[in-house]
Amino acid sequence: MVIFPQCLDCKNYIGPSEKKGIYICKAFPDGIPRDVFWNRVYHTDNIPGDHGILYEDKRKRDQAKDRE
């Protein structure tokens, strides 16, 4: 089974950091926790260190633009 990180569908996702193996987003600019990145913890509720920024599905935003 292939598992895709929830972060890839989040509008706050930035991408890989310059540090190898570290992925960043607006919520976790110093590195997304592995449990969040690999879907062991869903980021729909606040997690310590997330600066109050939660997962937001970017596909919903794109669908809203398509309807305009």
Image (cartoon, helix red, strand yellow):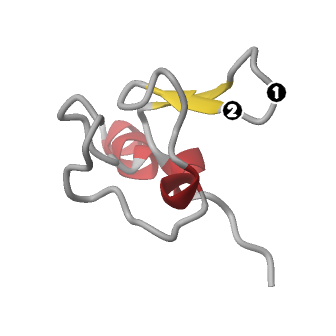
Mark 2 Cα-neighbour bin, 10 Å: few <14, some 14–19, many ≥20: some
Decide which of 55, 40 is in the foreground and name it.
40
Q: Which amino acid type is marked by label 1?
A: Lys
Label of residue 67 in the image: none
In the rendered image of this protein, does residue 47 appear above or below residue 26?
below
User: How far across and down, in percent of the image, does residue 35 sit?
Assistant: 52, 60
Q: In this view, does 54 lie above or below 6?
A: above
Q: Is residue 67 left or right of residue 16?
A: left
Residue 24 at x, y = what percent?
56, 28
Quarter of the figure with the N terminus:
bottom right
Instruction: State left or right for residue 32 relative to residue 27.
Output: right
Q: Which residue is disc 1 drawn over?
A: 20
Q: Position of residue 11 (x, y in %)?
A: 43, 36
Q: What element carries label 1?
A: loop
For this view, does 42 lie left or right of residue 23? Answer: left
Residue 2 point in image, percent of width and height: 79, 75
The reply to whether callout 1 and callout 2 are in contact (CB within 8 Å) is yes
Residue 22 has which mark? 2
Query: Which one is nearer the viewer's eye here, 62 or 51?
Result: 51
Q: Which residue is drawn at 53% across and 66% down?
A: 39
